[in-house]
Amino acid sequence: MTTEITSMFSSSNSIEYLVEQYLRLESGPRDNLVKQQNDLYERKDVLSDLDSSLSSLQSISERLIDPITDHFATKSASSSDSEKVSVSAGSTAEMGNHSITVERLAISDTRVSRQFDDSGSSFSSYTTDQTISIEIAHPTEADANKRLAIDVTIDAASFAQDDRDVLIQIADDINSAMYTAIGAETIDANEAVNVSVVTEESGKSRLVFRTQNSGYTYRMDFTDSADSLLADLEVNAAVQSTGTAGGYITDVGTSATDSELNAKFVIDGLTFYRDANNVTNALSGVTLKLLDTFTSPQTVTVTIDTDTVRSEVESFLDKYNDAIDYLRENTQMDPDTYERGLLADDITYRGIHYDLREIMMSTISGVSNSEYSKLFNIGIETDDDGRLSITDSEKFTEALESNSSFVAEIFNASDGIANQVNDYLENYVKVAGTIDGSKNNIDDQLSYLDDRIDLMDELLTRRENQLREEFTQLQEMMYQLSNQQSFFSSFFGS
């Protein structure tokens, strides 16, 4: 009987198979290192997500303890007729009702020249350049009444044209001077005077000067040229324009109280005059937008904005619940699957879950009203999983409407919940904090494992080449033995 002793080395595929089997056995230590590496990457991802979750919770905590903006005192305002006056309120607004009537709205200062025949030659007597000056408002913090004069020169050659062309040239020169002043930041864009030429009927034109801002503060004043160009135009006339004559459209007056450029309105029996119809300084913290005139009193009502405040608190609770859920998932054992979270063996992070719950359940000593010293007092309770929510809306609203500070102090008192959470999380989420330290430690371990794996890959590559060479030599030997076996079998068989 003949035995085939070369079957295992009959082809290159057989050699590759043997090499693969040997390497699989010898790759065990490397595979263990790769598993350790993958576990570390997964752990690092968990820490990154934890950092993000806790940072979000800290950010909303910082918002609630903001010393500048009291997010618990947000107010809402309404008008009994929003088509006549609309209203909004900030946190400093006082709650209550206010009666308002509006006698007139603020308007822009508008002056017009007398009417000219388009084909006339009214300006032919001007043979030299004419320089006029337009004084406009440029209020600053240091000087609310500051005014600046913008000089405008009209070239003598311009006056040889027909009247309409002269008016167009004057308008262009004034507008150009205003644009230059804006470009040089001498004035703001909304402080400029705009000049245009209008045609009321065929063949008749006049100049119209108009301020962009409304009110007496932004009125125009003029200084005429040496040859009285403005007087000829009747732009500087201290009279109201009628018919074809020039003058003012609205009485400018001599002060804020007698100028018809200003809005005039009455709130709770007091008379106010303002340059604009958007009024921010009549009622503290309240913005009024005057839309029409009316003599029948309308009511402006300012109340606490419970919906917005509730949204602020719920945002905080949502971030807390997200953090608690993530910590429970990754620092504890799943009671159903008995699978342990990736951070379950790390005492550094296991305690955060319990510490945060303890803070949320704490009694705040720094409140002004001891009846409102814990979340339960404003209708916030915990469920079986430790998640918090506003379960008693009536209790929450009642606390806000009684005094918004009752709700605020539970969060932003010196030992308030938001202050405690912010301080507690700082060491974990700050740059170079606890979580950064853990991630850096993982990076060091990953770097070490990378080096070990690279070394093992090099050794396995050498081993692979060695095995392939040895099996190839063995295959050649098997071929020789097989040939000898065939020879002897043939010899003895014959």
Image (cartoon, rainbow, N blue to C red):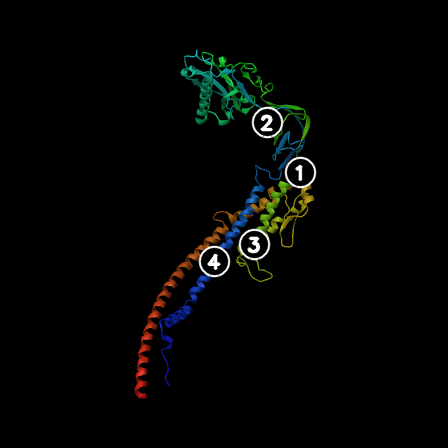
Q: Earlier in the sequence, mark 4 or mark 3?
A: 4
Q: Residue 403 shows which numbered tag?
A: 1
Q: Earlier in the sequence, mark 1 or mark 3?
A: 3
SS class of the residue under badge 3? helix
Mark nearer the viewer, 2 or 3: 2
Q: Mark 3 sits on what residue?
A: 327
Calculate the distance from the C-alpha at mark 1 to the C-alpha at mark 4: 51 Å
Spot occupied by residue 153 in the image (x, y as percentages of width and height):
43, 18
Q: CA distance from mark 4 to mark 3?
A: 18 Å
Q: Nearer the viewer, mark 2 or mark 1?
A: 2
Residue wearing tag 2: 277
Mark 4, secondary structure of its residue: helix
**Labels 1 and 4: the sequence-earlier one:** 4
Give SS at disc 1. loop
The residue located at (44%, 27%) in the rendering is 183
Residue named by callout 4: 40
Amino acid at the residue labelled 2: Asn
Q: Please name the amino acid that badge 1 sits on.
A: Asn
